[in-house]
Image: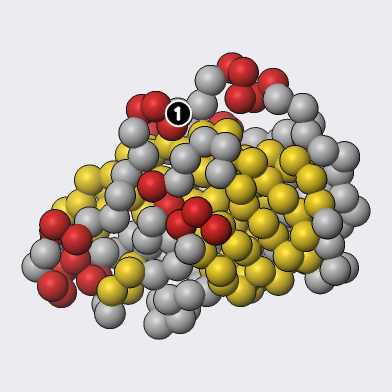
Amino acid sequence: MPRFGNIAIASVTVAALCSGAWLLGSGAESHAPPQPSAAQASARADREQSAAPALPPSPPDRIRIPSIRVDAPLMGLLLTPQGSLDVPPAEKKNLAGWYEAGTTPGETGTAIVAGHVDNAEGPAVFYDLGALKKGSSIEVQRRDGATAVFSVDAVEVYEARNFPDEKVYGAARRPELRVITCGGGYSKTTGYQGNVVVFAHLTGSH
């Protein structure tokens, strides 16, 4: 499969995830998804933790995050003509996607997974992503039969206009994972104003 640096993804990567159609349609901003606290932000120690040995490349088929009850299939995503990451169909609320022109989850580098926070009918696959805590486990089932196990280093939220492309998409010297959805403030005019990003590193496989 073709492989390109993740940093090529534009800062509007997940804009299409962020319409907030459910909040807009219900008129119930009290239903806004949870957002990470400052205590879940990254620290230098998080970035220095050693990782498990890297796995060979293999496409992922499923992602599980037990602590927030996520168990979802993964589809491949590529870039749109505008340079942003394409997104899973909004009507399939329990479907996430991975950037298939980049690193596969478990190999050395930064693998990218993205999914909707909600759709017109209600919460979607990553609605509770902002409630994830440091140390939580993320499992990615791969097509080669292995399951890559990641430990969460940080959960952060960024305004779209200040999205840190290099921090999120930049190359890593160990196997890392980013899980991205919408978050931050919400506007009835433009939807969610930013993104929730989970930073994790490989701690094992089975």
Closer to us: 68 or 117: 68
Name the secondary structure under disc 1. Answer: loop
Of 158 and 2, nearer the camera is: 158
Give the residue at the far bottom of this rendering.
91
Q: Mark 1 points at which residue?
A: 41
Answer left or right for 148 relative to 12.
right
Extreme top residue here? 44
Is residue 176 visible from the viewing direction of this image?
Answer: no
Rendered residue at 61%/48% (across/down):
137
Q: Which amino acid does label 1 sit on?
A: Ala
**Residue 101: % across, % down:** 72, 59
Residue in the image at 71% along x and 36% along y: 171
Give the crowd class for mark 1: few <14, some 14-19, many >=20 residues within 10 Å. some
Q: Where is residue 70 in the image (x, y as percent from the top left)?
A: 51, 64
- The residue drawn where x is 50% and y is 54% is 67
Q: Measuring 73% from the left and 65% from the top, which residue is drawn there?
A: 141
Whether residue 76 sits left or right of residue 198 in the image: it is right
As drawn, 110 above or below 139: above
Q: Where is residue 92? Give x, y as percent.
A: 45, 81
135 with respect to 189 (left or right): right
Q: In which quarter of the image is residue 143?
A: bottom right
Along the line of sight, the residue nearer the viewer: 182 or 3: 182
Say left or right for 120 vs 134: left
Residue 142 appears anywhere in the view = yes
Residue 185, image x and y in percent?
A: 22, 45
Which residue reaches farthest left? 27
